[in-house]
């Protein structure tokens, strides 16, 4: 398979995964960090009336700066919400049963998503979960051969869909939020996993194929190629959980 064939599989699957958000008549919030995953969602929904971009982070955190720069590159506005340390601590207590038994590397992103949904208020919220698992965006995919990368991708995706996404859905329900994750739509997952793992290997940059596909979709290069910290580090939430753990 050549790369253009991969795009031909991803494009219709992505359109199907985005159909609900495109049809939505209510105000809709895109959780936006300024990186390629949420950037593509924001780009695709930018012309839709009543689309709101939202980012959260501790004061001075990298995600607030990245989201501001990314929104400027897209020609849209983003609402920046600074989350004080105390709010992160309160959230960790409030959702302690959802976070229990998770390592900090998974608890921190889930808490970040919970705080973002709480900041969004009720209604539809769109987030970029799933792209890293499908397109090998995590650091642990570096230097893996095709077989090992495929096995790790499958394991990461299964854990996300069966545990972390389920807990996120429960938090969303509690908050009165309708959480949509287009990259986890079954049609899109099947299309992504049908692409040979060799094409999805990161090479010199994480999610290399995903980034080039986002460029193919029209996403500005500055957003598609932006190197960005993972949510838990970009928001500063990981540091708070580390301190609480100590």
Image: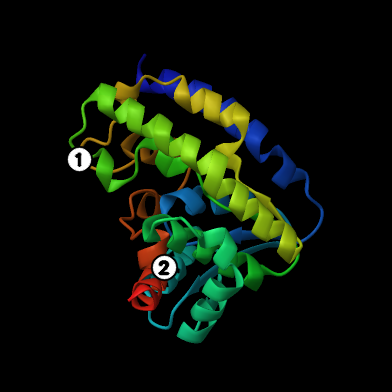
Q: Is 98 situated above or below 139?
A: below
- Residue 126, position in %: x, y? 63, 53
**Relative to 105, 88 lies left or right:** right
Q: Residue at x 46, y 42 (%)?
A: 131
- Residue 92, position in %: x, y? 52, 72
Q: Looking at the rendering, in which quadrant would you find the N terminus?
A: top left
From the image, state whether disc 1 or disc 2 is nearer to you: 1
Residue tagged 1: 204
Secondary structure category for the residue under label 1: loop
The quarter of the displayed image where residue 153 is located: top left
Could you tell me if residue 15 is visible in this image?
A: yes
Give the Cα distance between marks 1 and 2. Answer: 24 Å
Q: Residue at x 55, y 75 (%)?
A: 93
Q: Residue at x 41, y 38 (%)?
A: 156
- The circle on residue 69 is 2
Q: Is 32 situated above or below 65?
A: above
Could you tell me if residue 54 is visible in this image?
A: no
**Relative to 156, 48 lies left or right:** right
- Residue 4, position in %: x, y? 41, 21
Q: Earlier in the sequence, mark 1 or mark 2?
A: 2
Q: Residue at x 54, y 30 (%)?
A: 189
């Amino acid at each position: 398979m050549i790369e253009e064939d991969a795009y031909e599989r991803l494009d219709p699957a992505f359109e199907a995964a985005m159909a609900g958000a495109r049809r939505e008549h209510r105000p809709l919030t895109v959780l936006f960090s300024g990186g390629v995953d949420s950037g593509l969602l924001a780009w695709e929904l930018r012309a839709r009336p009543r689309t709101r971009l939202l980012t959260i982070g501790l004061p001075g955190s990298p995600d607030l700066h990245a989201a501001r720069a990314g929104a400027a590159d897209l020609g849209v506005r983003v609402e920046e919400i600074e989350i004080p340390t105390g709010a992160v601590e309160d959230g960790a207590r409030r959702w302690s049963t959802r976070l229990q038994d998770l390592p900090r590397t998974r608890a921190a992103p889930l808490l970040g998503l919970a705080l973002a949904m709480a900041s969004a208020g009720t209604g539809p919220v769109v987030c970029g979960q799933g792209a890293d698992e499908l397109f090998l965006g995590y650091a642990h995919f570096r230097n893996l051969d095709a077989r090992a990368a495929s096995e790790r991708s499958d394991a990461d995706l299964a854990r996300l869909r069966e545990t972390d996404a389920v807990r996120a859905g429960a938090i969303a329900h509690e908050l009165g939020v309708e959480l949509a994750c287009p990259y986890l739509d079954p049609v899109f997952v099947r299309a992504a996993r049908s692409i040979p793992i060799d094409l999805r290997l990161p090479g010199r940059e994480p999610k290399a194929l995903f980034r080039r596909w986002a460029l193919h979709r029209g996403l500005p290069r500055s957003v598609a190629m932006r190197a960005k910290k993972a949510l838990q580090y970009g928001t500063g939430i990981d540091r708070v959980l580390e301190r609480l753990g100590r």
